[in-house]
Image (cartoon, rainbow, N blue to C red):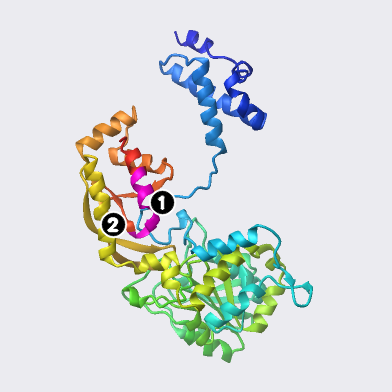
Amino acid sequence: MTQNELRHLPGVNDLLSRPELEPIIQNTSHAFVVEAARAVLERARARIRNGASAPDMAELATAIRAEVAQRLRPSLRPIINATGVIINTNLGRAPLSESALAAIHAVAQGYTNLEYDLVAGERGSRHEHLRMALRQLTGAEDCLVANNNAAAVLLVLSTLAAGREVIVSRGQLVEIGGGFRVPDVLRQSGARLVEVGTTNRTQLSDYEQAIGPETAALLSVHPSNFRITGFTESVPPADLVPLAHRHGLIVVEDLGSGALLDTTPYGLSHEPMPQESIAAGVDIVCFSGDKLLGGPQAGIIIGRADLIKQIGRHPLMRALRVDKLTIAALAATAQHYLLRNAPEALPVWRMIATPLPALQARAQSWAAQVRAWGFAAEVIDGVSTIGGGSLPGETLPTALLALPQQTRIEKLMERLVTGHNQPPLEVLAARLRSGDPPVVARIYRDQLLLDPRTVLPDQDTALLAALKVALGI
């Protein structure tokens, strides 16, 4: 029976001769359509081997149109983040402000003065577009921007410490996610790492005893994605400065998250700020653009003008430089801090600052809609996290829409997804992720949870529509 059904499947050429496929064949790469047709036929063969009947030509043609449309859909898509993790690395970190988006649109449409001095009528520097704002905000003498913070640290040490020693505490040799470890990034610069102290305790004397004729710099790495508690001791960068300068060395600080606003008024512990490091005399400070700064992915380097000049001349600078779109978005983001409206204008800070009653009201509204569809839903207390290697262990109170595992959801998921062997809430979460737009939620203690803190206010309607589709309503 199976072989007979398999013989009913047409060949690719016969299938592509169908008149209903002519428009996509004319408007799409022929090889692209052929590959989609082969994929559809292969899935049909698999179903036949599992006992299904062969689809007819019309069904196959419809499937090919759907396959082509799916393959043409951009892989990188907007999603709704309902996880409660504000700076979610896997979901693209900081959403940009309206003015940053407008700035990107403005410079993307045509030519710009990216590296052209309009006054002098000659070649200029792309870093000039950010220099004034970053100097004003941080108190640094000068600045450069690379394409991320790891690149910034690599560039700094490649310029200032290649072939020489850099002293760093063992408690600061962190892994920054995705398997990338700070020691590996630093060794790539050509510097020789000298580890001092222990995992939990490092003293100023440890640095002093390690200084030798080959030492170039003392490195401080802010442990922004973990926290060691208990019997601990570390040396703040401000205390390293006098020691380093007394020996003719420099202090380089990898600050990580780059908070330009004080986090304590929002009920969080204090996150070190770039302007504090510069005021303390740190020679070079590196931090991210897409974490607590609230802008695009970038690695910002600030510090002494003479050192910045050297770094800017290194051959790696061209390989690691940012493009005009990043510069436009970063300049617009920096302007919010200059205008002192960052808490209102930048989505990351709006999420951090949103009061609990506002979150409760949104969650209650969502729950009322879900209950109107006939499903159990409640609003429970929970916590949101900052994420993205910022303020580890710090949380903000929130209100969560909770969909408990229940008989109706179990039966519904069995009906909607034939043959699934996953728990019903896992199936529901997967259906949310496959929606348009995709919604990313989390499951905890047999409840599917959605956190309004990280759902942008104008996404409420889309979220409920996606949830309705996922529930099969």
Q: Residue 153, percent across and down?
A: 58, 70
Tell whether position 203 is magenta. no
Tell whether position 459 is magenta. yes
> Badge 2 local density, few (<14 within 10 Å), some, or many (20+)?
many
Instruction: Judge by depth and name the residue closer to the eye, 407 or 325.
Output: 325
SS under mark 2? helix
SS under mark 1? strand
**Above/below status of 49 relative to 397:** above
Q: Residue 31, percent across and down?
A: 66, 29
Q: Residue 240, percent across and down?
A: 50, 85
**Above/below status of 11 relative to 305:** above
- Amino acid type of the residue tagged 1 in the rendering: Ile
Q: Which range of residues does the magenta coloring cover?
A: 453-465
Look at 39% across and 55% down and name the residue there: 458
**Above/below status of 92 relative to 213:** above
Residue receiving disc 1 = 80
| Chief secondary structure of the magenta portion | helix
Quadrant of the frame with the C terminus: top left
Quadrant of the frame with the N terminus: top left
Q: Is residue 260 among what the camera can see?
A: yes
Residue 335 lies left or right of residue 391; in this view the side is right
Residue receiving disc 2 = 362
CA distance separating discs 1 and 2: 15 Å
Q: Earlier in the sequence, mark 1 or mark 2?
A: 1
Number of numbered discs on residues: 2
Look at 59% across and 18% down and name the residue there: 15
Instruction: Judge by depth and name the residue closer to the eye, 107 or 255.
Output: 107
Q: Is residue 42 among what the camera can see?
A: no
- Amino acid type of the residue tagged 2 in the rendering: Arg
